[in-house]
Image: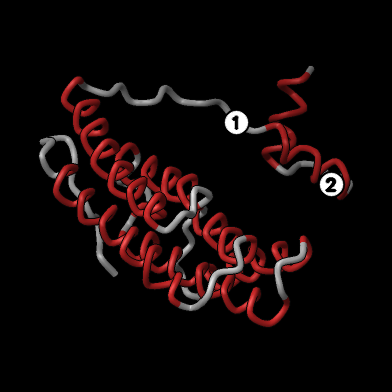
Amino acid sequence: MEQAWEKADQAGSFKQSPVRAYLCKMKGGRCSDLPSVSISGLLVTAAGSIAGIGLVGALSAYYSLPLLFPSFGATAVLLYAACHVPMAQPRNVIGGHLISALMGVLTYHFLGGQWWSVTLGVTLAILAMIITRTLHPPGGATAFVAVFNGQGFGFIVSPVGIGVLCLVFIAVLVNNLSSERRYPDYWW
């Protein structure tokens, strides 16, 4: 019975209520098997992560901004383990973090560091990344840090700008060591 319902649903042979159509979207589909990862792929991922996170960890310590570490850590996952996805390409990584840092700094500058201004700063960062086609989810955390820690405009260049350039540079060097990878797919 369920299969017949799904076939009719897919064929569009009957009209669904808007509520049912909305709820049917939540069923999801079947997950195809994810590709296996070779030993060399794992080694490249580990090398990139150690080099990249080590470097930005030192930056976070130097600037006494431990909350910046999670944002860059999430970027490292994309750069060194999923370098083929659009959100891991240099335009998205660099632009996403810089734009998010700018939105966070501007929000703090004009509205202070209250909980609602942190919320607004992250939301503005998301909207700015969408508009500029630089969507990079860890950028939301960068905006959060900027507002929460009350950062000034220098935060955008250092540690954020330097940090993301280092992460991307290491990703270019390390990912291309593997015959299974090519990074980046595009720069801009």
Above/below status of 10 relative to 123:
above
The image quarter containing residue 151 is: bottom right
Q: Earlier in the sequence, mark 1 or mark 2?
A: 2
**Picture quarter with the C terminus:** bottom left
Q: Is residue 175 left or right of residue 179?
A: right
Instruction: Look at 42% across and 49% down and name the residue there.
Output: 72
**Picture quarter with the N terminus:** top right
Residue type for callout 1 = Gly
In the rendered image, residue 106, in percent from the top left (x then y), is placed at 60, 79
The image quarter containing residue 38 is: top left
In the picture of the structure, the residue carrying the numbered disc 2 is 15
In the picture of the structure, the residue carrying the numbered disc 1 is 29
Nearer to the camera, 149 or 20: 149
Instruction: Look at 35% across and 54% down and name the residue there.
Output: 59
Above/below status of 8 relative to 68:
above
Q: Is residue 32 left or right of residue 79?
A: right
Q: Is residue 103 left or right of residue 116?
A: left
Residue type for callout 2 = Lys
Element type where label 2 sits in the image: loop
In the rendered image, residue 126, in percent from the top left (x then y), is placed at 59, 65
